[in-house]
Amino acid sequence: NAGVTQTPKFQVLKTGQSMTLQCAQDMNHEYMSWYRQDPGMGLRLIHYSVGAGITDQGEVPNGYNVSRSTTEDFPLRLLSAAPSQTSVYFCASSPYRDRWGGETQYFGPGTRLLVL
Amino acid sequence: TQLLEQSPQFLSIQEGENLTVYCNSSSVFSSLQWYRQEPGEGPVLLVTVVTGGEVKKLKRLTFQFGDARKDSSLHITAAQPGDTGLYLCAGAPESGYSTLTFGKGTMLLVSP
């Protein structure tokens, strides 16, 4: 299994440009999520999905859109990039409530985004 | 909103020293997880603690969940340079389905 994969690894955008960050998992996990990681801010949840066709907002959803048409894929779209969206983005998946009642997250390697 | 506070934010020690990292909250969690993140990579799960007072050991790492399930600690014995990384705690809510709450992390640097 490849686990959670993310593309691209690095991206530079100009303010106002749009782009899609790709995320895929081959573990048949129901739950997928997107986080951004900024210095001193930790991991902040952007959007998440509990299954195909179902998405919901996290802590910092503004400026981002998501969709979940399949179990495997969960793309994150930036409609009009802003410098404040410069960050490292992580996609994660989870088998939903595992037998411990928690949510073990399996993270991808991240996408480093710079918005000029 | 459930918050997790980690301390210290940064720790620089010499190889062979012991250290403890703390994760505290005023909220009760059904379980608490510890992740380690190395530079340029995503976080990787180290352990999940579920029961109040639970202690789990992973080689030189000892994890403890507070009796009231509001806090946790990570103790590393005889730290090695390979332990260098960002340590994150994350709590799962006590009731209902919701999302994990992550602490801001403790950056550990172990020098030879």
Image: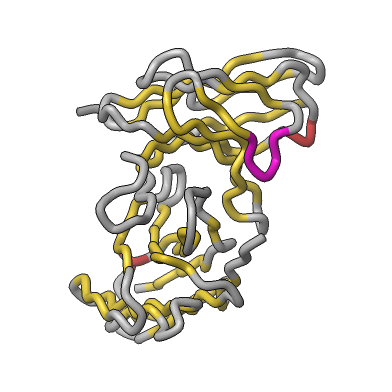
Residue B30 placed where, x, y %?
42, 66
Residue A103 visible in this rendered orientation of the protein: yes
Residue at image coords 50%, 37%: A90
- In the picture, which quadrant includes the C terminus of chain A? top right
Where B47 falls versus A18 (above or below)? below
A106 relative position to B12: left or right:
left
A14 relative position to A91: left or right:
right
Where B15 falls versus A4 (above or below)? below
Q: Is the magenta stretch mostly helix, strand or loop?
A: loop
A90 relative position to A28: left or right:
right
- In the picture, which quadrant includes the N terminus of chain A? top left
Q: How is the image coloured?
A: secondary structure
Residue at image coords 59%, 43%: A45
Instruction: Give the residues drawn in magenta, as a range.
Output: A57-61
Residue at image coords 48%, 49%: B97
Residue at image coords 26%, 30%: A27
Residue A108 visible in this rendered orientation of the protein: no
